Amino acid sequence: MKRLDIAYRTAPKAHIIIELKRYSAAFTSSELQTQLKNYKYAVHGVLDEHFPGEEHTVEVVAIVGKRPADAVGHWEDFTRELAVVNARVITYDELIERALADYTDYLEADKQVGRIVDVLTKLEEEVLVNEDALGAGEPPAGEGGSGRPPAPDGQQDGGDAAAGVQDGS
């Protein structure tokens, strides 16, 4: 068996084999399909030898520069045939496009999260300022401090005696 380009285990008993073709490589759909099947069966053989009786999932992915010319007219049929053996083909250009789209989505989501974090940070700062003011005996920001509305006509609230309330004695 030829050396594998990339072998990766995503989870216990789930393996991905990645075949990297040169961008300029030319091959037929039959050649590619045979190679991917051979890799899958070879990896299954090694896994069965080292872990007898255990079930393993092996996916094979070929990353190519161009789709096989003989599969262009029936690409969907070809991909269905590959799916039967848990294999697929993607071009480098498609891979880059997907990565850019995913990264753009990530940046947009990160921007939204950043806005939410900014709002939460401002709220937290306001709460801390209000807690500090309460701890220092000062009224919280935006409040009169006594629990009563501010005195009319710009008068200072100096307590009940200053407001003209007599104690009845």
Image (spheres, helix red, strand yellow):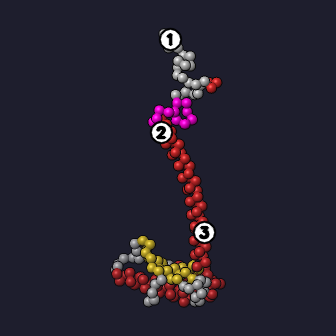
Residue at the spot 56% in from the left edge and 51% down from the top edge: 118
Q: Is mark 2 on a helix, strand or loop?
A: helix
Q: Nearer the viewer, residue 5 or 119?
A: 119
Residue 90 appearing in the image: yes
Magenta residues span 135-145
**What type of secondary structure mainly makes up the magenta span?**
loop
Badge 3, how many Cα within 10 Å: few under 14, some, many 20+? Answer: few
Q: Nearer the viewer, residue 11 or 80?
A: 11
Badge 2, how many Cα within 10 Å: few under 14, some, many 20+? Answer: some
Q: Name the residue under label 1.
A: 168
Q: Disc 3 versus disc 2: distance between alpha carbons?
A: 46 Å
Q: Which residue lies furthest to the top in this view?
A: 169
Q: Nearer the viewer, residue 144 or 107?
A: 144
Pick the quarter of the image with the N terminus.
bottom left
Q: Name the residue under label 3.
A: 101
**Eye-nearest disc, 1 or 3:** 1
Q: Disc 2 versus disc 1: distance between alpha carbons?
A: 38 Å
Q: Nearer the viewer, residue 39 or 24?
A: 24
Sequence-wise, which precedes: disc 1 or disc 3?
3
Q: Which amino acid does label 3 sit on?
A: Ala
Q: Is residue 148 above or below residue 70?
A: above
